[in-house]
Amino acid sequence: MTDYFEARGVKAEFYKDAKLPAYYKEVLEGLPHDARILDFGCGFGQNLFAIKNHNFTWQMGGGNRDFRLVGIDINPNAINFVKSLDIESFLIEDIFTFKPKEKFDLIITTHVLEHLTKNKLIDILKHFRESVLKENGAIFVAVPNAQSFTGCYWAYEDFTHNTLFTAGSLIYVLKMAGFKNINIIDKDALAGSKGIKKWIKKVFLKIYTFHIKFWCKMTNSAFHAPSPQVFSYEIKALAN
């Protein structure tokens, strides 16, 4: 059978110079200097490699960090590549069998949850909270945003996508898994933007938001009032 990444035209070399986006500052800076970090669905390990080599788009505060990094994935080719980066990694086909003796301070899972089926998704998140994370550990989730301009595209561009999220539905599954403190971070995708570029993005985002609200009014449409309105390409949440 053709490999997933091969079929999607994704190569490990694409990520060799990857840097962590600026919004990761909020995710990483509060961690202990020797925090254990797990990347669930690590792929070719681009997030872990960037953390290991301090390939950040910002200046990390609080001195040097010696994070202990682990990646898990269901793709053997991806795991073999991550091992070649000298990063501890494991091929895990059934996530419920993964019960580490030493738990983690942080789980990262980016563009993975949308591949899971609804009947397993909440149970997997609950398993992370109960069996993988430390008592005060956190999970960082990034998923494509169904409410974004390209939301419908990402629902179908990857044939293996099962679920697309809004901010409200992501908060819901995290709450149902037992996470209490849930924060949507970098809601307007402005982290790392500076000066005139940031100002221009803010202005056009206000115009875009006004446009959506206007046509909601004209068509008697509505959004779920308690849910944050996020229009960027992905939704990013930090929860514990």
Image (spheres, rainbow, N blue to C red):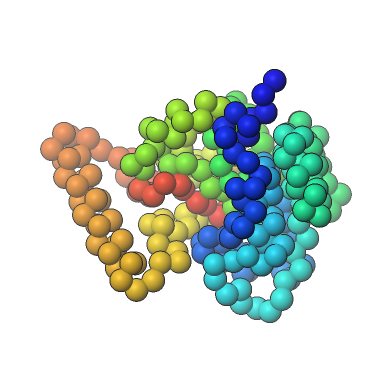
Q: Going 76% across and 68% down the picture, which residue do you hit? A: 66
Is any part of residue 150 visible from this angle?
yes
- Considering the image in quadrants, where does the C terminus appear? bottom right
- Considering the image in quadrants, where does the N terminus appear? top right
Q: Residue furthest front?
A: 13
Q: Is residue 201 left or right of residue 60?
A: left
Q: Going 53% across and 60% down the picture, which residue do you hit? A: 21
Q: Is residue 85 left or right of residue 142?
A: right
Residue 201 locus on image (x, y percent): 31, 61
In-front residue for pair 52/118: 52
In-front residue for pair 21/34: 21
In-front residue for pair 191/121: 191
Residue 200 falls in image quadrant: bottom left
**Does residue 206 sit above or below 61 in this rendering?**
above
In-front residue for pair 62/83: 83
Q: Going 51% across and 30% down the picture, which residue do you hit? A: 158
Residue 118 falls in image quadrant: top right
**Does residue 233 sit above or below 163 in this rendering?**
below
Q: Going 17% across and 34% down the picture, which residue do you hit? A: 220
Residue 160 locus on image (x, y percent): 56, 27
Is any part of residue 95 visible from this angle?
no
Q: Residue furthest top?
A: 1
